[in-house]
Image (spheres, helix red, strand yellow):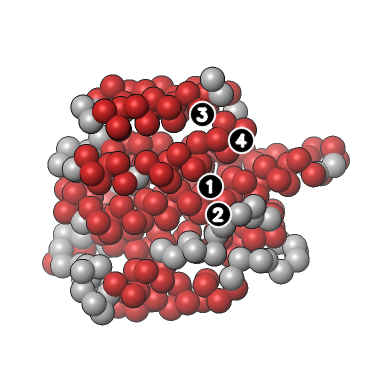
Amino acid sequence: MACATWTRHTFAATLACVAVVILLATGMAAARVDPTKLSAAQSAAARFLQLAKGSETTGRVPRESDPAVRPLIDMVFDTSDVTGPVSFQELTPLSQRMVTGAQIGTVYMLAGTGAADLAALAGDPQADAKVNRNVVRFAPEMGRFLDFELVVQSAIVEAVLIQLASATPAELARPNFQSGLASIRQGSLRTVASVIETLMVDGLSDEWRRNRLPALGGIAPRLARFLEPAQRADLERLATACADAMSDPTLKRTLQAFARTVAGS
């Protein structure tokens, strides 16, 4: 499965999911998630984007190995405050931080492709190959981006699960709540599927792949309780196929366990 496929389509799904999350959380009480992290991440991302200006043409992107860049990436991908049960009230800042993180990830995906945005890349017949090369070329930064997406998505799923458990039948029956819930489920499925698909990109090391497993393992039990049966079945099949493609015993075993957990078996 091609990484660029999820890059172009899952990113749009993530933004749609974020919009729904913000809508559902509007009017809630102040969040417990560190309120300073969002503004700090946005400022760091703005600085990073300045440094990366023109990279879609030149292919030269700020790297985390640069002492001037590392603090910016650290700030954007910081999830140290996303611990323990996350309340529904925390969805808005978390979702906005996910969008901020996606800005950084997108820079690495587009480097040297000639496309200024993902919509422009969609028309390139070589899009898949170009993005796959960038995933490998910028593997350290892409790994951090994917882990960040999984941690934040896991927190969002948990918050919605808590809300579902406490909502009244009338609240659950609201059409906008049901449609929003469906969008968040689909966005969660696509986000996690994208990471699994990325594990199969040629050129990535098994060590890099193994480093993605903790974040995948963290979201698996929540997906088992959150996704619809058909969605869980799709994810189980994808994880099993990925496991079958792996020669590394740890990757194979852990992905098989992920598939079983998501399936609820």
Q: Is there CB contact under 8 Å for labels 1 and 2?
A: no
The residue where tag 2 is placed is 18
Residue 167 on image: x %, y %: 80, 44
- For the C terminus, give its image quadrant: top right
- Looking at the picture, which amino acid does disc 3 mark? Val
Identify the element where label 2 is drawn.
helix
Task: Give the percent coordinates (x, y) of residue 66.
Answer: 21, 74
Direction from residue 83 to residue 138 in the image, left or right:
left
Judge by depth and name the residue closer to the eye, 123 or 76.
Answer: 76
**Quadrant including the N terminus:** top left
Mark with earlier residue (3, 4): 4
Q: Secondary structure at mark 1?
A: helix
> What element does badge 3 sit on?
helix
At mark 4, the secondary structure is: helix
Q: Is residue 75 above or below residue 204?
A: below
**Mark closest to the chain's N terminus, 2 or 4:** 2
Which residue is at 52% across, 72% downward?
Answer: 37
Q: Which residue is mark 4?
A: 226
The residues bearing labels 1 and 4 have C-alpha atoms spaced at a distance of 10 Å
Q: Which residue is mark 3?
A: 262
Question: What number is the disc on residue 154?
Answer: 1
CA gap, disc 2 to disc 4? Answer: 17 Å
Q: Look at discs 1 and 2 and give the one toward the viewer.
A: 1
Query: Which x, y percent locates residue 191?
Result: 44, 43
Taking the image as drawn, is residue 189 in sight? Answer: yes
Instruction: Tell me if 170 is positioned left or right of 249 in this view.
Output: right
Q: CA distance from mark 3 to mark 2?
A: 23 Å
